[in-house]
Image (cartoon, rainbow, N blue to C red):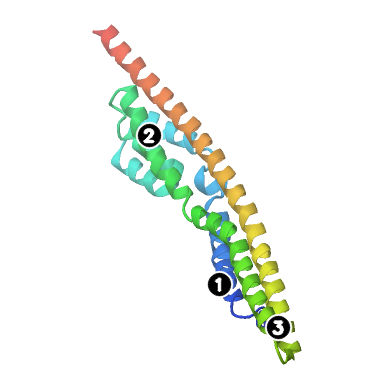
Amino acid sequence: MLSLIEAAGWPVWPIIFASIIAVGIIGERMWSLRKSVVVPKDLLSRVLNEYKRSGVTQEMVKKLQQHSPLGRIFAAGLQNETSTREIMKESIEEAGRVVTHDLDRNLTTLGTIAALSPLMGLFGTLVGMIEIFGSNSPAGSNPAQLAYGISVALYNAAFGILVAIPSMIFYRHFRAKVDALTIEMELQALKLVEIVQGTRAAINYKSEYST
């Protein structure tokens, strides 16, 4: 590997640096965007059971805020449990926008790397072509400089494409995954609103009827 880097010359170092960043982002997003972390299973049912048992408490809201992205959305809605349905939905939408922004973290950087890597490889190719033209002189050509220029041109183009392809694949994959998780969180949040507001309406109706 070291011999390949030496053959590619100094233009390859920005590509290597970009590849290290891309690998770090891919690993971090694969860990952070797990469904069990973002949308824990049975969280909605557990929240509703606790709500029916003891109502909304500060401890319950605090635990949800620290639990998961979906928990943060539930907490925002439950904090406005005594308000109207519209206000509760608005608070959930605001929290959802913040959560979605967090889920998108570093994806713009990954997409930028995917787009720029071929250009960095092209820059290395141009440097190699300059070396090739520089090997020709009135006294004759320099075979060593000619070979070095060819290796710089080809290796940089190859490295740039090699970094761009997986970066673009994972960028598209993570974007689709964030969209799917966002839709699922929205659906579960709407269920929470309907059940909580329905329960409140039933309680209010009983209290009015009893009086």
Rendered-image quadrant of the C terminus: top left
Coordinates of residue 21 in the picture (x, y in percent): 54, 66
Say which mark, if any, is on residue 92. 2
Farthest left residue?
211
Marked residue nearer the N-terminal end (2 or 3): 2
Disc 1: which residue: 14
Q: Residues within 10 Å of mark 3 (few under 14, many from 20)?
A: some
Disc 1 secondary structure class? helix
Identify which residue, 16 or 97, lies in the foreground.
16
**In the rendered image, which quarter is residue 52 located in?**
top left
Q: Residue at x 26, y 10 (%)?
A: 208
Identify which residue, 196 or 102, lies in the foreground.
102
Farthest bottom residue?
139
Coordinates of residue 198 in the picture (x, y in percent): 39, 19
Question: Distance from label 1 to label 2 (Cα)?
Answer: 42 Å
Task: Give left or right: position of 41 versus 204.
Answer: right
What residue type is disc 2 on? Ile
What residue type is disc 3 on? Tyr
